[in-house]
Structures are given as structure tokens and as C-alpha cells.
Amino acid sequence: MLRVMVLVSGGGTNLQAIIDAVAAGNITNARLVGVLSNNRTVKSLERARNAGIPAVCVSPKDFADRAAFNEALLAKVDEFEPDLIVLAGFLVAIPQAMVHKYSNRIINIHPSLIPSFCGVGYYGLKVHEKALERGVKVTGATVHFVTEGMDEGPIIAQKAVEVCEGDTPEILQRRVMEQAEWILLPKAIDDIANGRICVKEGYVVSC
Ligand code: GAR
């Protein structure tokens, strides 16, 4: 049984998709052992508790500086002894110490077709604002392993989503979630839990 921990910052619709997929049997061989948020007030913590999953908050506001927060974040994650860490809208830079300790065991969902609209400054709704500004006709979402560089790790899966005339960032965000994110992320967890994918020489391959 893969021990899965989910890290969130916001509303947690991706977290909900994961919870629902486990309940429906679409993710097997995995157990959600904990949810961590950097934000005390988010709906995600409520979603976790409603599903009977231990939920905790580690907020940068409670620490003197970034280094102290990073240390506390890693210590809290370690307590859950996860085999896989899922960044489901976790909008905090992952400490390098965590990236190294959990090498090939952290995955992230990003709301664009990487390498478009990713990296520093591209997160949440901003990604869709930039896509609309640029006038792209197709966007999408990407699930990838987390490495040192932001949004640079080996790609697990991508799905394209059409941009429609009259889209606002909010409308486009919702379509990308519905047609891509909520499908890709649970499937990636299921694939990892069942040993269907692995990383070889920096690329994700079928095992
Ligand atoms: C999602 O769209 C996710 O892809 C994005 O934040 C949103 C969180 O929504 N993540 C990033 O931008 C990471 N760079 P949710 O809290 O409803 O799942």
C-alpha cells in the first residue's frame, strides 16, 4: 500500500478528485495518510477531515524566516512517512532538502502544457491569464515529478484542452480542471501505486 500525502494551498478541488478516486476504486494500492496546507483557513483541510484524513497546517506566518519554515515543513512531512508526496495546488517553493530526500517521490500538477506558461510567477489563475493574453488556442495540464528546477522534472502525463472565444481566466481554469487536472492527477497516483511507471535517465517510462 503506497502511503500518499497531499500538499495543498487553496480550495483543494484536485485533492477532492484524489479522495473521490480512492473512494471509487479508481486509485488502488494507495492510502491517503495526510493532508498538509500552508494556509490555515483553506477549504482543503475541511475536505480532508470530512474524508477522515489527518489534516495539518504549517504556515510560514508562524516562523521567523523561510529557513525555519522549510525545516518545519520537512519535519512535518517526515512524520507522515509518505512513499509519495502529491503537490495538488501547493503554491510554495519546495525546499531543496525535501526534493533531495524524496527524489522521484514528489509529483506536481501544473495547469498548462509544460514547457509553456510555467516556472517562476506561473501558478493558479495567473497561468490562465497569461495563456489568454498570449492568445493560445490550446492549453492543458501536466503532471510531473518534482526536481530542483521549478516545473522542470520528468513529465508523467499531459492533456490538451481547447481555449474558447470569450473565455475568462476563471472559465478556462475550470475547463482545464474538469477536462485535464482531475483526470490526470488521480491516474498518475494509480500508475505509481501499481508500479506502471518509473523514471529512467530523467524520463518517465512504463515499467
Ligand atoms: C490547480 O489549477 C493547480 O493545477 C494549480 O493550482 C490550482 C489549485 O486548485 N497549481 C499550480 O499552479 C502549481 N504551479 P485546487 O486547490 O482547486 O486543486
Image (cartoon, helix red, strand yellow):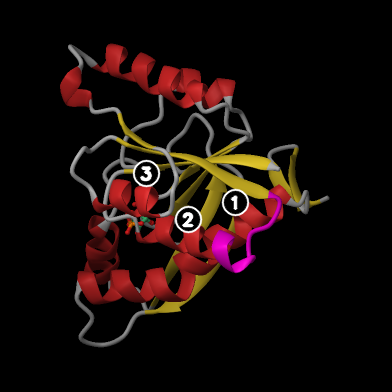
| Residue placed under numbered mark 1 in the picture | 155
Q: How packed is label 1: few (under 14 Cα within 10 Å), some, or many (20 or more)?
A: many
Name the amino acid type tagged 2: Ile
Q: Residue at x 78, y 54 (%)?
A: 196
| Residue placed under numbered mark 2 in the picture | 114
Task: Give, as a single range, the part of the protein colored magenta.
Answer: 22-29
Instruction: Give the tally of numbered discs.
Output: 3
Give whichever of discs 2 and 1 has the lower sequence position.
2
Q: Picture coordinates of residue 115 (x, y %)?
A: 47, 53
Residue 112 sits above or below residue 75 on the image: below
Say left or right for 198 vs 95: right
- Observer able to see residue 111: no
Name the amino acid type tagged 3: Gly
Residue 64 sits above or below residue 119 on the image: above
Residue 123 sits above or below residue 34 on the image: below
Q: Give the secondary structure at mark 2.
A: loop
Given residues 128 and 14, the one toward you in this image is: 14
Q: Residue at x 22, y 25 (%)?
A: 60
Q: Are marks 3 and 1 in contact (CB under 8 Å)?
A: no
Disc 2 versus disc 3: distance between alpha carbons? 9 Å
Q: Residue furthest bottom?
A: 165
| Residue placed under numbered mark 3 in the picture | 119
Q: Picture coordinates of residue 144 (x, y %)?
A: 55, 48
Name the amino acid type tagged 1: Ile
